[in-house]
């Protein structure tokens, strides 16, 4: 399975929340099914995500710029939440 392809499919057919603040809101409201953090995500936010029991996470090894490109966006994305996967198999990446 290719992460970039799965992510793009989730963005097109599901509901994906971009950005740390919005991702945090999604986690706190309980709607995040998977949280993806970039390799260079600020330690404070990465620690917040890691401290959430039962939250499925995936560490994207690339930078926030690379994650933004994977999302098809011209800006940096250090974190995102998958609320609905749509036709994507991205939720199978969760750890």
Image (cartoon, grey):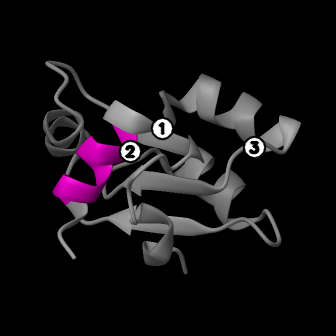
Secondary structure category for the residue under label 3: helix
Pointer 2 residue = 10
Callout 3 touching callout 1 (CB < 8 Å): no
User: Where, quadrant-wise, is the N terminus in this rendering?
Assistant: bottom left
Pointer 1 residue = 14
Residue sitting at 79 percent across and 62 percent down? 52
Residue 44 rendering spot, x and y as whole percentages = 60, 47
**Residue 61 placement, left or right of 82:** left
Residue 34 in the image: above or below residue 9: below
> 31 or 58: which is nearer to us?
31
Compute the Cα span from label 2 to label 3: 18 Å
> 50 or 68: which is nearer to us?
68
Question: Would residue 78 be visible to someone looking at this image?
Answer: no
**Residue 1 lies in magenta, yes or no?**
no
Callout 2 touching callout 1 (CB < 8 Å): yes
**Principal SS element in the magenta part?**
helix
């Amino acid at each position: 399975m290719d992460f970039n392809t799965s992510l793009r499919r989730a963005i097109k057919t599901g509901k994906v929340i971009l950005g740390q603040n919005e991702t945090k809101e999604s986690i706190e409201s309980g709607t995040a099914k998977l949280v993806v953090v970039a390799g260079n995500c600020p330690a404070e936010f990465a620690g917040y995500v890691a401290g959430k029991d039962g939250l499925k996470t995936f560490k994207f090894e690339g930078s926030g710029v690379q994650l933004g490109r994977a999302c098809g966006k011209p800006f940096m994305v250090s974190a995102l939440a998958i609320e609905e996967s749509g036709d994507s198999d991205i939720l199978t990446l969760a750890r």
